[in-house]
Image (tube, coloured by chain):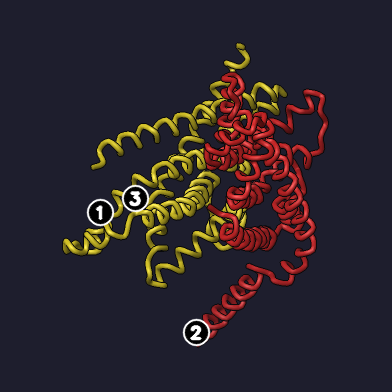
């Protein structure tokens, strides 16, 4: 027991990196998802094509391959990233691509009549989007966005493979020095599990809040 | 005059240098020569995906049936296990199995461990898919089976599952692609799949650009093709 307690500071320092990765990537993913999700819906090819390409490329290749590519290949093109920035950028763009599809689905789920009513009331296109469509779409996108947040938390473990010492990396380090694999990985899994529970709990609270304030 | 000429030569040299560097940024001949090796690795990746999916489908059904159980203990155990597998990183699960199973006396090759990890992780997702499928079967089917005096397990096998499975085929396909894209994680336990092969090529030749880019392209092509195929099955079997 005391041994487990002695590991905790090390694991918790890794947890801090994991959390900042998650938050940083989420801060990239949210605007990216919104912009590319809406651009994908545009009928204008110069908006539609780039966003479709971005979404297909980031959804179609593996997150780990993207991570390696950004970390090992981009420096050849003269763009050097440290492990943390590469992790934040790749995870943000990866989850952002999935999020763009969520945004697209949610906006498409808003009934056509809403557009027509807004037009009848002489709302401009921008007003229709920000005042009528997005608030309704937001309610629909919340549950899948919450799932994506959990996916994001889980995929931060991948960044350990490009040598960033986050939670999984610290777990590996401790395993190498103590050889107590079962206990260390069980604790690591448990920490991730608790974090996921926190995220899903928070999202559920937000859902309830939004559905109260709605209408 | 002299200075001007030397400046000119200087820019020419620079231009030449940048051209040769440009040539080296992506060496097509080198990339082409890597293809056979990567295609061999692709076979490992694809077979890990297929075997992992087979395991996940069997295990997922098991969880789904357990969750349907009337016994609260069975129901809650299955629910907790599914939640746990779903909300922890696959990579850590891979490490767990890789390091803990030998301690427990079970010696598996890295490939087998990888399949086991993929199967267990995705079984939790598939349990949810099965549950949705089972719940989409109308209640009347259960009642009719009851009226015909079929046992619960017989009802499940003969009445419910045959109706629950076809609508979930597209969802299963989506998870197949997701699993395919997660196989690079097996490189962490030295399975010689695509990413691991690319890393080894990179370490041997000091060139990461071509192998890693090719791996990305291979993944992109295969997942785009499979996504097309799933859209086709959606039209055929979907809700």
Q: Give the crowd class for mark 2: few <14, some 14-19, many >=20 residues within 10 Å.
A: few
Q: Vertical placement of B26 versus B13: above or below? A: above
Percent coordinates x, y for residue B140 in the rendering? 53, 38
Percent coordinates x, y for residue A173 in the rendering? 65, 30
Q: Vertical placement of B116 versus A62: above or below? A: above
**Is B8 placed left or right of B41 in the picture?**
left
Per the model, the C-alpha gap separating discs 2 and 3 is 65 Å
Per the model, the C-alpha gap separating discs 3 and 1 is 9 Å
The answer as to whether the residues below labels 2 and 1 share one chain is: no
Percent coordinates x, y for residue A145 in the rendering? 43, 44
> Is there CB contact under 8 Å for labels 2 and 3?
no
Q: Give the crowd class for mark 3: few <14, some 14-19, many >=20 residues within 10 Å.
A: many
Between tags 2 and 3, which lies in front? 3
Secondary structure beneath dot 2 equals helix
Chain hosting mark 3: A
Chain B: give its colour: red
The answer as to whether the residues below labels 2 and 3 share one chain is: no
Residue drawn at point x = 59 percent, y = 52 percent: B170
Secondary structure beneath dot 3 equals helix
Q: How many marks?
A: 3
Sequence-first disc among 3 and 1: 1
Chain hosting mark 1: A
Residue drawn at point x = 76 percent, y = 50 percent: B47
Along the viewing direction, whichever of A129 and B144 lies nearer the viewer = B144
Which residue is tagged 2? Answer: B4
Which residue is tagged 3? Answer: A137
Which residue is tagged 1? Answer: A132
Is there any visible trace of residue A172 in the rendered image? no
Chain hosting mark 2: B
């Amino acid at each position: 027991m005391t041994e487990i307690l002695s590991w905790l500071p090390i694991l918790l320092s890794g947890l801090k990196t994991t959390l900042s990765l998650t938050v940083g990537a989420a801060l990239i993913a949210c605007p990216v998802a919104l912009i590319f999700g809406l651009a994908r819906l545009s009928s204008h090819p110069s908006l539609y094509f780039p966003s479709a390409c971005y979404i297909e490329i980031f959804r179609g290749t593996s997150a780990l391959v993207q991570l390696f590519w950004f970390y090992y290949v981009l420096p050849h093109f003269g763009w050097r990233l440290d492990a943390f920035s590469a992790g934040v950028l790749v995870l943000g763009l990866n989850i952002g691509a999935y999020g763009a599809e969520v945004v697209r689905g949610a906006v498409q789920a808003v009934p056509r009549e809403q557009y027509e009513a807004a037009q009848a009331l002489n709302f401009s296109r921008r007003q229709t989007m920000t005042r009528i469509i997005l608030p309704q779409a937001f309610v629909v996108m919340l549950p899948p966005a919450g799932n994506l947040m959990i996916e994001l938390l889980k995929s931060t473990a991948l960044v350990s493979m490009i040598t960033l010492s986050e939670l999984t990396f610290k777990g590996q380090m401790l395993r190498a020095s103590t050889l107590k694999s079962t206990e260390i990985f069980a604790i690591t899994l448990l920490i991730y599990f608790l974090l996921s529970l926190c995220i899903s709990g928070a999202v559920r609270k937000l859902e309830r809040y939004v559905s109260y304030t709605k209408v | 005059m002299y200075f001007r000429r030397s400046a000119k030569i200087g820019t020419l040299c620079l231009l030449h240098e940048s051209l040769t560097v440009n040539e080296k940024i992506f060496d097509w001949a080198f990339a082409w020569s890597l293809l056979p090796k990567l295609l061999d690795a692709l076979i490992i990746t694809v077979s890990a995906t297929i075997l992992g999916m087979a395991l996940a489908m069997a295990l997922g059904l098991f969880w789904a049936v357990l969750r349907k159980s009337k016994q609260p203990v069975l129901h809650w155990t299955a629910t907790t296990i599914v939640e746990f597998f779903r909300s922890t990183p696959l990579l850590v699960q891979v490490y767990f199995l890789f390091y803990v199973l030998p301690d427990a006396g079970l010696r598996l090759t890295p490939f087998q461990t990888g399949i086991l990890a993929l199967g267990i992780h995705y079984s939790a997702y598939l349990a949810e898919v099965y549950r949705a499928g089972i719940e989409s079967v109308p209640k009347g089917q259960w009642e009719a089976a009851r009226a015909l005096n079929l046992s619960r397990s017989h009802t499940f096998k003969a009445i419910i599952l045959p109706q629950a499975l076809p609508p979930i085929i597209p969802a299963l396909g989506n998870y197949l692609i997701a699993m395919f894209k997660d196989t690079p994680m097996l490189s962490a336990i030295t399975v010689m799949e695509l990413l691991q092969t690319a890393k080894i090529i990179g370490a041997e030749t000091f060139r990461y650009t071509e192998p890693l880019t090719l791996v990305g392209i291979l993944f992109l092509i295969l997942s785009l093709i499979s996504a097309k195929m799933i859209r086709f099955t959606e039209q055929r079997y979907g809700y």
